[in-house]
Amino acid sequence: MVLSLKNKLIVFATLFSFVVLLVNCSNNATNEEAKKADSTDCVKPLNPNGDSELALLMRNMMSSSKNLKEIIEQGNIPKEFPEAFKKIHTAKPTDSDTKKESFDAFASNYISNLQNLYNSPKEDLKKNYNAVVAACASCHSEHCPGPLKAINQLKISE
């Protein structure tokens, strides 16, 4: 079967378009994974009546911590400090009694450890990541113990 020049061009154009589409989709998937790893606003409300600002922030922190764990376990360095997490001091809780007097000290400890992690040399990443997880666990042991089991599963073996 001999193809005319016109048919050859159509076949070539079709194949070329297919290859470009595959390469583009592959690059988009890689970019989406990278964005997801550093994302701080990927959590949807769970409560049908709406979730508090603090509850949503905490879920974002959990999601971010899971992504950080993967990044660090793969030997990579986290990129950009999640500035939105500094809102922990002002975020409104579901129940106003949730924030006891010690809450701000725990929140400051968390932010300090998180900043330390993002400024860590590669050899200290696991240790400093675990310090962030410990800061979460210490606060939740006093203020809201429900997520402690999930928080403790975030630890990385050193």
Image (cartoon, rainbow, N blue to C red):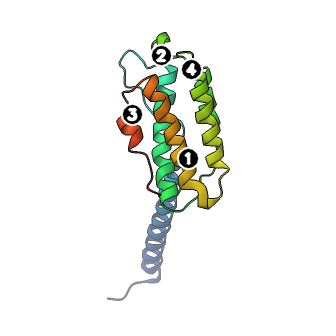
- Which amino acid type is marked by label 2? Thr
* CB within 8 Å, label 1 to label 4: no
Q: Residue at x 65, y 36 (%)?
A: 83
N-terminal of the pair, mark 2 or mark 3, is: 2
| Residue at (52, 21) in percent of width and height | 53
The location of residue 144, given as percent across then percent down, is 42, 23
Q: CA distance from mark 3 to mark 1?
A: 23 Å
Nearer-the-camera pick, 21 or 42: 42
Q: Earlier in the sequence, mark 1 or mark 4?
A: 1
Instruction: Give the foreground label among 4 and 2.
Output: 4
Q: CA distance from mark 4 to mark 2?
A: 11 Å
Gap in Å between the C-alphas at discs 4 and 3? Answer: 18 Å
Q: Which residue is mark 4?
A: 102
Residue 34, horizontal then vertical, whole percent: 53, 53
Sequence-earlier tag: 2 or 1 = 1
Kind of residue indicated by mark 4: Ser
Q: Secondary structure at mark 3?
A: helix
3D distance between C-alphas at marks 1 and 4: 29 Å
Q: Is residue 89 left or right of residue 15?
A: right
**Labels 4, 3: front one:** 4
Give, as a three-letter code, the residue at label 3: Leu
Write down the residue under mark 3.
Answer: 148
Tally of numbered tags: 4
User: In this picture, is 100 found above or below 80?
Assistant: above
Real-space CA distance between mark 2 and mark 3, rounded to the nearest whole angstrom: 15 Å
Pointer 3 or 1: first along the chain: 1
Residue ID for mark 2: 98
Residue named by callout 1:
38
Query: Along the polypeptide, which appears first: circle 4 or circle 3?
Result: 4
